[in-house]
Amino acid sequence: MADEFDANSKRFLVWLSENGSWVSASIDLVDLRQRSAGRGVVATKDIAEDEALFSIPRELVLLPTNSNLSPIIFEAVENDPWLSLIITMLHEYALGPDSRWSHYFGVLPSSFDTPMFWTDGELAELQASPLTKKLGKAQADETFRVKLVPIVKEQLPTSSFFKDDAEILALSHRMASTIMAYAFDIEPPVQEVDDEGFVSDEDEEALPKGMVPMADMLNADAHRNNARLFYEDDKLVMKSIQPIKAGDEIFNDYGELPRSDLLRRYGYVTSNYKQYDVIEIPSHTIFTSWCELFEVADLEERVAYLEEHDAIDDAFDLSHPDPALTQPSERFLPMMSTELRMLISALALSTEEFASLKVQNKLPKQNAPPSKIISKTMAEMLKSSVNAVSAKYSTSLSEDRKLQEEGVFKDSIRKSMALEVRVGEKEILEVAAATLQEIIDDNTNQEDNGMKDQGQKQGEETTEGEGKPSNKRRKLK
Ligand SMILES: C[S@@+](CC[C@H](N)C(=O)[O-])C[C@H]1O[C@@H](n2cnc3c(N)ncnc32)[C@H](O)[C@@H]1O
């Protein structure tokens, strides 16, 4: 097996050089399967910053416009970058040895560890991770069945290669997953930029997706990024962005992805991405917590107003706190997205304040000090939401940590990755709940002291016991 793996790597490198590419003698394509990383690129000599590592001519990029397929085929999918590239890859794959890219296919994967391909038992180990709702398998099946299958059968010159619809569907998933983990957005030779040197979002969205041989052999590992792809007129050049020592692996940048996204898109996780982890708090959970804790007569009106101002998402991310900060409110603030801050600020307004905001057609100000931005009221509501999300997982963080220590999933890379993802999410939930409790306990918050006095005047309690939302609701001023 090792022989075939190595032979495919060698054939691929020969193919590159025979087709106008250049690969530096200071790097090598190596076998990293021992640490479950497939192939990777390493430095064989010390490399200076800004040194070219390899260059690939633009014609060698596996791209719809570089194939010999008619543009009419791509118009049938409205030139969608994903679908166009899937069609191109299906066609080139079907051509077999007659494809210009056949030796490239020899180093591309035929199976994946992304959750899209997991069994129900493996998926169950993700428990309540929001990742389970993002896989979109049924939707992808539907798109492939409705849009791709008819094109492949009726318009591809290689249609006879495909045995039946099921094979087209399976290969479409394989190509889509390859694109997800390997493709690049291919910048054109000349790109229009605005006065400040930025490409417009529309132009960026419209970029075609393409498979860049060799550039996609680079693995990634959060802060270990030491190379980057540069788009030149006639070629794409990978360059070092810092000095690299002989023997070190060369890493591209896949972005600041939470481990759940790393798993969904690339089928692997490493603890180096822990810093980017997030947990989603669904907006309906926030509204439910709010209504359970407080009387908000005009919740629907507030939600409608915020929706009108595009300030409501289906869910809001919570990320890791800034441990360097000492005040709980200061620490918690960076955990919240601006959108979540906006939402809770708007919900916490009194009826009069909200009415005035509406008259001014504005959203709540976000420039108050942290202790004002996260009042006790908000902390109670957020903590109740965080607890509701935690309760959806079937095991606790300490139980999961024990499972990790015992290595219960050591024979299943997929289950152990699921465990790592859910542990990361539970860690954020735990730290969020603890920090929010600190804010609640912080009696220096003038605003909440005022509200508590008022609440007591009405003969109502605030909260019952440690972290439990009161079942007696409190009026918001
Ligand atoms: C762009 S490809 C990189 C080349 C890939 N290793 C190969 O053998 O084809 C992306 C894939 O590489 C793997 N990968 C990337 N970085 C990794 C890492 N730090 N650890 C383990 N696997 C990694 C994942 O399977 C991912 O889907």
Image (spheres, rainbow, N blue to C red):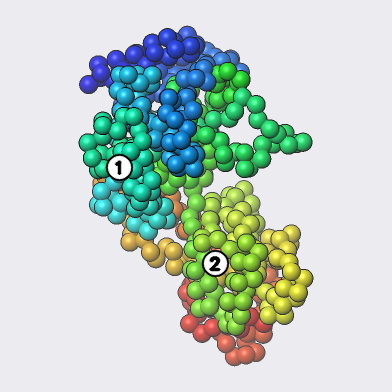
SS at mark 1? helix
**Which residue does the image show at 30% across and 42% down from the upper left?**
169
- Label number found at residue 169: 1
For marks 1 and 2, the one nearer the N-term is 1
**Which residue does the image show at 68% across and 78% down from the upper left?**
350
- Above or below 202: residue 293: below
State the image coordinates of residue 329 (x, y, percent, origin top left): 63, 60
Q: Is residue 393 left or right of residue 365?
A: left
- Report if residue 468 is visible in the image: yes
- Label number found at residue 382: 2
Viewer-proximal residue among 310 and 74: 74
Residue type, label 2: Leu
Q: Nearest to the eye among marks 1 and 2: give it.
A: 1
- Above or below 470: residue 93: above
Q: Is residue 161 left or right of residue 53?
A: left
What crowding class fits label 1: few (fewer than 14 Cα within 10 Å), some (14-19), or many (20 or more)? some
What crowding class fits label 2: few (fewer than 14 Cα within 10 Å), some (14-19), or many (20 or more)? many
Q: Quadrant of the N terminus?
A: top left
State the image coordinates of residue 97 (x, y, percent, origin top left): 30, 19
Residue type, label 1: Leu
Quarter of the rendering containing residue 354? bottom right
